[in-house]
């Protein structure tokens, strides 16, 4: 049985939060106590509309938790934005494993949430069951579109578009001609990053007559290196150490909090005098994980905070719709983060190439991953 517990937010991104009060298994989630949250790297909209103090916005995390410095946390921060701007009530339930999904969602229904966000592909089945059993309740499923119902809004992201740019950049910046990636679980919302990254490297090789290798992902086999979950940071650290030992000097973990193990391994290597860097995903890692900002080349941003904020405001204003949302480079639902401390190391030529490729992807002249 999952017990009620208080977790301190990550120092990097939950400045000012006293605690997150989490739901007991199958019981009613508790009210959020209100706090400021750090910028995840994506833009947020201005406050919309009048206060809605009777509106209850709710969110259930995947097993990574709300302090994963990645997709769970980014989504949560979007709801916190609306709590601050429109004075709504919010409730959250953090899942430790798959067995928590159903009771956590049931708890949201019992609390008469006006909209409930399920964060991640792994919650699709439980969200579909909850929606079917409660047709008058509104749900939004982040990062998956497999749960179809009149009362579910699916929110997905073409992260391969932004990951393509990250792969191209990494190929341009590597000194060893080897870059790496690995995933948490082998699920579509993870592999889409890895495939986009590898395609971007291949494009760089084609454009510049180079032979940069990608370790950890094989496009032909559509398979690669995976931890098997989003919790085992030690294994993430070990996998990263192996990629570094094989010669990769830029690594993109697509693994939620497991990626923090990767960052630790890369930082240790840098501290030993090696010129190594990381590419983060979901949030701008330079801001969400500032402990590791000195190794952060860039990030593949998935603007889940902005999406949650916009969809919640629509629900408050009586405009909830099950029309799917797809985040792209064009609508800024995905993006490549700034290069921050490494900006001066990225040549003007590479920056222009990235701008040109981005324009081609937006226009449809260049097909990436799932759009092919």
Image (tube, rainbow, N blue to C red):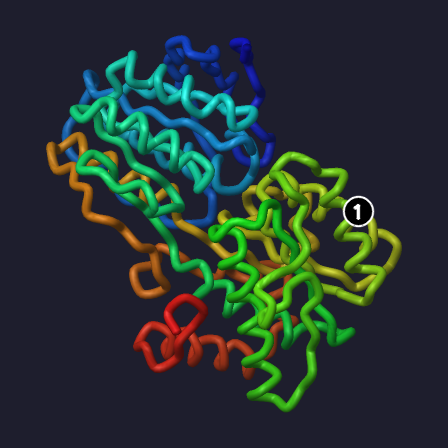
Q: Secondary structure at mark 1?
A: helix
Residue 299: x and y in percent read: 54, 56
User: Residue 115 sits in which quadrant?
Assistant: top left
Outermost residue, bottom side = 209
The image quadrant where one finds the C terminus is bottom left
Tell me what residue is drawn at x 44 percent, y 25 percent. 101
User: Residue 84 sits in which quadrant?
Assistant: top left
How many residues crowd around disc 1 within 10 Å: few (fewer than 14), some, or many (20 or more)? some
Q: On the rendered structure, is 245 left or right of 276?
A: right
In this figure, which residue is indicated by the disc labeled 1?
Answer: 238
Outermost residue, left side = 318
Tell me what residue is drawn at x 52 percent, y 28 percent. 98
The image quadrant where one finds the N terminus is top right
Tell me what residue is drawn at x 41 percent, y 22 percent. 102
* Viewer-side residue, 88 vs 251: 251
Residue 153: x and y in percent read: 25, 41
Residue 237: x and y in percent read: 76, 45
Tell me what residue is drawn at x 82 percent, y 48 percent. 268
* Viewer-side residue, 130 vs 357: 130
Residue 347: x and y in percent read: 60, 78
In the depicted structure, whether residue 283 falls above or below residue 251 = above
Q: On the rendered structure, is 240 left or right of 340?
A: right
In the depicted structure, whether residue 64 falls above or below residue 179 = above
């Amino acid at each position: 049985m999952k017990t009620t517990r208080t977790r301190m937010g990550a120092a990097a991104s939950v400045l000012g939060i006293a605690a997150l009060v989490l739901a007991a298994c199958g019981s009613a989630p508790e009210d959020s106590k209100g706090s400021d949250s750090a910028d995840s790297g994506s833009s947020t909209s201005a406050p919309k509309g009048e206060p809605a103090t009777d509106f209850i916005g709710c969110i259930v995390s995947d097993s990574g938790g709300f302090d994963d410095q990645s997709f769970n946390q980014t989504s949560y921060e979007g709801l916190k934005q609306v709590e601050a701007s429109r004075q709504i009530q919010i409730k959250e339930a953090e899942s430790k494993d798959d067995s928590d999904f159903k009771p956590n969602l049931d708890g949201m229904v019992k609390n008469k949430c006006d909209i409930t966000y399920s964060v991640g592909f792994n919650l699709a089945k439980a969200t579909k069951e909850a929606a079917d059993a409660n047709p008058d309740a509104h749900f939004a499923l982040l990062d998956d579109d497999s749960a179809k119902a009149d009362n579910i809004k699916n929110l997905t992201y073409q992260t391969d578009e932004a990951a393509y740019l990250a792969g191209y950049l990494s190929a341009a910046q590597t000194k060893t001609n080897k870059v790496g990636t690995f995933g948490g679980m082998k699920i579509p919302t993870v592999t889409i990053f890895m495939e986009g990254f590898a395609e971007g490297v291949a494009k760089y090789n084609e454009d510049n007559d180079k032979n940069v290798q990608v370790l950890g992902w094989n496009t032909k086999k559509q398979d690669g290196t995976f931890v098997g979950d989003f919790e085992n940071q030690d294994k993430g650290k070990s996998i990263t150490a192996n990629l570094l030992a094989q010669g990769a000097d830029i690594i993109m973990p697509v693994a939620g909090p497991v990626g923090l193990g990767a960052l630790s391994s890369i930082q240790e290597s840098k501290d030993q005098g090696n010129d190594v860097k990381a590419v983060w995903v979901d949030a701008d890692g330079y801001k969400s994980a500032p402990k590791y900002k000195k190794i952060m080349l860039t990030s593949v941003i998935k603007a889940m905070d902005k999406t949650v904020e916009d969809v919640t405001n629509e629900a408050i204003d009586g405009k909830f719709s099950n029309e799917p949302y797809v985040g792209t480079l064009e609508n800024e639902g995905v993006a490549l983060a700034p290069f921050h401390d490494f900006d001066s190391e990225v040549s003007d030529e590479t920056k222009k190439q990235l701008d040109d490729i981005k324009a081609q992807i937006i226009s449809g002249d260049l097909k990436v991953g799932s759009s092919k």
